[in-house]
Amino acid sequence: MKNEDLSDLRARIDALDANLLDLLNQRAALAQEVGRRKNGQVYRAEREAQVLARVRQLNRGPLGGDAVAFLFREIMSACRALEEPLRIAFLGPEGTFSQMAAHKHFGHAVTGLAVATIDEVFRAVETGRADYAVVPLENSTEGAVPRTLDLIVGSPLQVCGEVLLPVHQNLLRKREGLDGLVRILSHAQSLAQCQHWLDHHLPGVERVNAASNAEAARLASEDEGTAAIAGEEAAELYGLRVLAPHIEDEANNTTRFFVLSNHDAGPSGRDKTSLVMSIPNRPGALVELLKPIAQAGVSMSKLESRPSKSANWEYLFFLDLEGHRQDPKIAELLKDVGRQTVMLKVLGSYPAAA
């Protein structure tokens, strides 16, 4: 009787699979038609954000919200690829957290372009080699990525999305055990995120900066005396063993990435606007600048200063505001702020990451 019941359940699953396949292909055909009517613009960040928010809201389980969002992200990615796969530049080589962030945002049906430096990530989109760039912006443990901030000020690219990626660091090696281990390679930020763990467990082992954690994993795969700190994808890609998982010092360690292109996104209903500005070098100038933001009732989720390259002791200020620059309240606020600044650049408006 139990075998018969199991067979019935499997038959129902088979029937549902056939229905799902038919519905997926119907959706793909409609997506192709939408693509033709959009005159070639394959990706719309605000529309995809609305779809994911809607399916999360409609979801009644037992699948969790993240699982449903992942499935629909991949469905949209596959539908986009029927027209032409998006070309996404990221800090390589393959296996970096930047690549993981690109897949989280765009799905896996894309063409990845792994480059050696953040400068090259920007340049790939600026020169047309890639459609979009994914660049690390800040980490919850170690703060901002200075090179990204420096480049975005002068770049013509705009922010059209953000990705929040939980970062789990792992100690990887070609063979089991710690015997004969003489050095640990990783990106400087990854080493810093694991500093206390390393001090406690491997205090005498040399720590060496690498261009990326995936590059560290690649090098560790060629040298038994070297270990790397990187993600699980890098371990799989380069055939390394995970000697110690999740060695980051902060359990909620998260990196925020910007998605860049030649355009920002339209309003999605839950957006951010990022700005960079410089202000007159006089007492109280920053306080005066922040007053219109408070008076307008706009929430500011980020304020960070960075030394200006134009003169000593002058600073640039990076702000994130909640809302889209097409919102009347934000548009009027930008006018007010612009009158008080020496320089104001809107980096872009984009859907806030879930």
Image: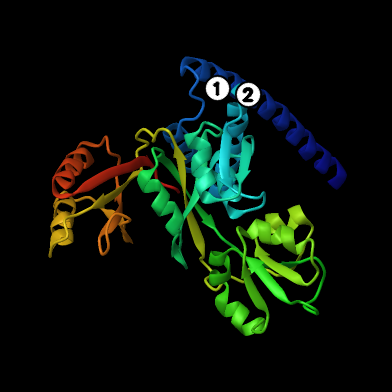
The reply to whether the C-beta atoms of the residues labelled 2 and 1 are less than 8 Å apart is yes
Q: Position of residue 179 (x, y in %)?
A: 80, 80
Is 291 located above or below residue 258 in the figure?
below
Q: Residues within 10 Å of mark 2 (few under 14, many from 20)?
A: some
Horizontal side, residue 328 vs residue 65: left or right:
left
First along the sequence among labels 2 and 1: 1
Q: Position of residue 194 (x, y in %)?
A: 58, 72
Is 199 located above or below residue 266 in the figure?
below
Residue type pointed to by label 2: Leu
Residue under circle 1? 31
- Residue under the image location 22 percent in, 42 percent down: 330
Q: Which mark is residue 82?
A: 2
Residue 20 occupies quadrant = top right
Residue 281 occupies quadrant = bottom left
Q: Nearer the viewer, mark 2 or mark 1?
A: 2
Taking the image as drawn, is residue 60 in sight? Answer: no
Q: Nearer the viewer, residue 194 or 205?
A: 205
Q: Position of residue 107 (x, y in %)?
A: 59, 39
Is 187 located above or below residue 151 in the figure?
below
Q: Position of residue 293 (x, y in %)?
A: 19, 52
Q: Residues within 10 Å of mark 1 (few under 14, many from 20)?
A: some
Gap in angstroms between the C-alphas marked 2 and 1: 9 Å
